[in-house]
Image (spheres, grey):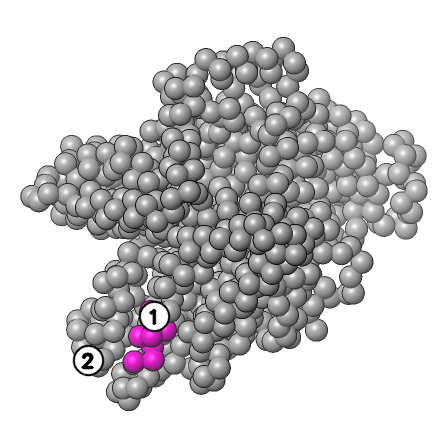
Amino acid sequence: MMNSAARHLLDRPGTVLPLAKVDGGMLAWVGGKAANLGVLINAGLPVPDGFCITTTAYQRVAAEAGLDAIVAELEAGAGAEASTGGSRDTSAEGAAALAGLAERARAALEAAPMPDDIATAVRAAYAELGNNDGVRRLAVAVRSSATAEDLPEASFAGQQDTYLNVVGEDALLDALRRCWASLWTERAVAYRSDNGIDQRAVSIAVVVQKMVDAGVSGVLFTANPLTGRRHEAVIDAAPGLGEAVVSGAVNPDQFVVDTASGRILERTLGDTLGRTAGDNAAGSGEVCLDDEQVRALAELGARAEEHFGEPQDLEWAIGPDGAIQLVQSRPITTLYPLPEPAETGSANGRGNNGGSAEGNASDSGDGGTRAYLCASLLQGLTRPLTPMGLSAFEVLADAYRPAGGNYGAPVPFSYSQAGLRLFVDVTPVLRSKTGRRIIPAAMRAADARSVGALQYLMEDPRFSILSAPKLGALKGSFRGSLKGSLKSMPQLAMIPHVLHGLVRPAAALERSRRAEQEFHRMLVLPEPATPARRLDFVESMLGRMITPGLLKQLPPPAAGYIWLGIVRWLLGPLVQSGDLQAVLRGLPDNVTTQMDLELWHAATIIRDDAEAAQALTQEDPPELARRYAEGSLPAVAQHELAAFLDKYGHRAVAEIDLGIPRWSEEPAHIINVLANYLRLNDPDRAPDRQFARAAATAEAKAAELTQRARTRGRVRGRLVAYGLRRVRATAGRREYPKFGLIVALAALRAQLRRVGTVLADAGRIASPEDIFFLDLAEARVGLRGADLHELAAERRRTYNRELRRRRIPRLLLSDGTDVEAAMGASASATTTAGAHLPPGTLTGAPASAGTVTGQARVILDPAGAHLEPGEILVAPSTDPGWTPLFLTAGALVMEMGGPISHGAVVAREYGIPAVVGVPDATTRIATGDTITVDGAAGTISVK
């Protein structure tokens, strides 16, 4: 019987293959570009005739050129991470090593002799192509077709070379060699590294096609690449060859088409013929395309998308005979995936990859477009959740879904996932008068930038308020489902306890502390336990135990914030902007600030020990983490780090995802923060002193507000004084329910990892950590014997791809529209700062008053981040895992969040100025820029 290796060799095509014989399964031999052209041809779409010089030819020449040795040198040198799909070394030395590798590889390929049989096969195919056309010296287009190109996960557009109007055999062979060499341009090597593509595995084929004598050409996107809206084609067109459009050398005409109806929604004329913006009437004779051609292109694009199963980016040309030819097709890799419908959606990590599938439009049966608010961003999380993390949230949510599948609350929220991130369906809120009054006010505090996008949707007729008959029926159903409402909103059961906390705060506080202790006890699973019992325990905790246990800790801080509202009402016009915000600085009993201050205290002890201080300031954090694990750190450092991790080791950056390793497992981040603390030499900037000053400022402000209230009467003054004392005493405990959730997730993570160890030992997954790339049901299947290697590996690839995604839509429609992108995401729509500001001024939501000028430090991931004392932290968002950096920051600027988001609250407590909800702050501000942050005005001035 023939083995698989022998079968593979027999199935391997020769040096040259006609495009008509290429199909999508030949990627390894013909590359992405040729494979996609073969799919178009087999689908009956118009593609210029041509042939493909397969990877077989390149691999022979590369082997003779000694390229394997050059890649091996890369693997052993500064760029080793790049060759295995890891993080690229972006230092000056790493960039120089990468450039040197690329140059040597190109030189080797260009100098290698062309084997006679390959040259003969190429000449013969070229001659046959010309003979078929009756032309002896045929003009052809020669395009690179790499095996890591035009793929669903990375397009690699423009990374390899294309040569047009190539005439003659010698010119063709020269273009072929240059295409091979272009696989090793510096930009191509760097792009592969950044996208996790193994340098050793990549190869290249070359496509040769008849040139189209194009009168007009351009590109066609079958989904809007700017807004993400599916089935809205965008066509760019210019006279002559399409390279001018692709390269950006011209400003093309642009047409936006509704694919379903064929209606042309927009026409924008470019400057390709020296026209003016006023000459944009259809049929004026000056547009590149008439309406019939625009619709014909959109129809061809729709056919291509249907055949590939996902939106496409196509290049096209129209010859002298008026016929449209498609010369290239690749997936649009930048589109954000569509949300899964709520009734069938799963938090299992099995989300679509951004394809064009319909059926996501509605989960209520009305066939309408749905609106989803990104819950991950509201938690300060831009990175994706692991599949197990999503599965955990699905179990948490399903536990509070009443029988029948619909949430019984007056505002029936439901969750979905897209791009491994959580989204909440806000369609019912937008279509309700009450919802429209509540949600903007709530979001101004939680995520100010969302307000403008929500108000934008309120003007959209697709989200009009429900008609009176429908609304009446809806209200009737709610009146009949009080039990369902209580189940889907268990916090309603806490209202009596919150009211009790208003009048008997000491008793409420004691009850909350007992609940905290009880909560910790229930997280212990009696041993011994089987793997199946561990999974039962995880599901039971998530489904029935965690939420009630956490809610019991809620009444004291909730009562504190109610008192804050009462104080605001009692003061009336006597309270000024920022007064009550100042009262919330330096709050006691905040578990997150306590954690940060304890870490600072550990740093002060380490500083006093010369050996420990030297180790932390001179060795790399990963090496120190290794030494900590083996117990070989200097005694003082070992003890202080162990004490801190014993108390707070369950925490992590992105800690709401139980798939993320905890600090106790990977302490390099905390070690790095300790090293940063040791660089702080100004005693006046010591975090404990700053916190004490913030607390003193808050107490002084409380006394001042009490004095103002007394001007309106002694009783009013006493009530304000009492209320502010209650606020200061209990509001800090707002972090305890979140802290408790993270304790629980860490405990459940430990149980799941033990199950992962069993699965790995049994050969069902590659490593124990792979269990976090499954969901709970799949883990059970693995215990029954299923092989989950490929499933976990594919989930990891999807997760790593999503990790690289920078833009996450805060408001996403079921048709793929990123609402902020559609409305222009103007900063003026989401800021309380003035509209007329000097150039170079960014605006956001005021979060913590104060003004600081300093150097910016842009940090996208706190792991391994270096922040000099006094530098201004600029980040996409933050969660508690970031807060140790706050202690030495001069100020905070965040792209996400509102005045009550986590970063804003902690900034106030530390007394550092903060502005949040600043669009694109991490790209508009660069590390080293001198900026002024005005936390009261919500502005950042970049000098």
User: In the image shown, does 845 or 793 lie closer to the viewer?
Assistant: 845
Q: Residue 662, image x and y in percent? A: 30, 57
Residue 603 painted magenta: yes
Residue at position x 21%, y 74% in the image: 639
Toward which corner of the image does residue 793 lie, by quadrant? top left
User: In the image shown, does 478 or 114 lie closer to the viewer?
Assistant: 478
Residue 629 painted magenta: no
Alpha carbons under labels 1 and 2: distance apart? 17 Å
Per the image, the residue denoted by label 2 is: 635
Q: Amino acid at mark 1?
A: Leu
Placement of 234 over or under 738, stated as above or below: above
Image disc number at residue 599? 1
Placement of 703 over or under 755, stated as above or below: below
- Residue extent of the magenta highlight: 598-605
Q: Residue 183, image x and y in percent? A: 51, 60
Is residue 207 visible from the viewing direction of this image? no
Q: Is residue 125 left or right of residue 295?
A: left
Callout 1 touching callout 2 (CB < 8 Å):
no
Looking at the image, which residue sits at the far bottom? 610
Residue at position x 29%, y 81% in the image: 606
